[in-house]
Amino acid sequence: MSQDPKAVVRAYLEAMDAMDWDRLRTLMHPEHRFHFPLAPAPLDREGHIGLSQGFRQGFGEFNHIVTEQLASGDKVATRGKVRMKHTGEFNGVPASGNEVEIGFLQMAEVVDGTLRHEHVQLDALGLLQGIGALPAPPA
């Protein structure tokens, strides 16, 4: 695999989309820390995979679309969208069948071809509105 930090991040997102948890583990540094606003504290590698597996139970179809990446040394900023389909219960909200597209921003530190630190922000309000957990804004 290329050691280009942007390519490492793209491979990581592809493994997440494919639910290839073994591949994902190989792309996570042993000291991996996932910083996510909905988690009470940074998650380690297995905690991050567990959170992702739980999320995927509610969203069977899942696809990251990278629209922009910038790299400086071992740091990579990625901006994009996630398209997903709400096919199962998510945080107590029964499957709606709705297709949802939300924006995300990710900052990653890539060390030895793996993600060591990862900070993610996503449009949680848009997600909750998209699955019907909150009312959509008036048109």
Image: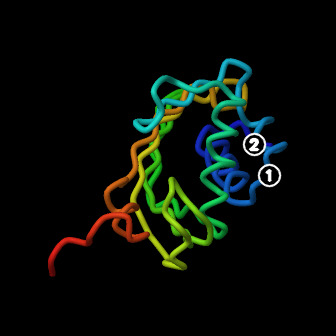
Along the line of sight, which residue is nearer the eye, 110 or 31? Answer: 31
> Residue at horizontal 54%, vertical 79%?
97
Quadrant showing the C terminus? bottom left
Q: List x then y, in percent, for residue 90.
A: 54, 58
Q: Which mark is residue 20?
A: 1
**On the rendered image, what quadrant is the N terminus found in?**
top right
Pointer 1 with pointer 2, Cβ within 8 A:
yes
- Percent from the top left, x then y, of residue 131? 43, 69
Above/below status of 55 relative to 134: above
Residue 63 point in image, percent of width and height: 60, 65
Point 47% across, 49% down: residue: 69
Q: Residue at x 69, y 39 (%)?
A: 49
Front one among 53 and 103:
53
Q: Quadrant of residue 85?
A: bottom right
* Circle 2: residue type: Leu
Q: Secondary structure at mark 2?
A: helix
Q: Secondary structure at mark 1?
A: loop
Instruction: Residue at the far left: name it.
Output: 138
Badge 1 amino acid? Asp
Classify 116 as above or below 51: above
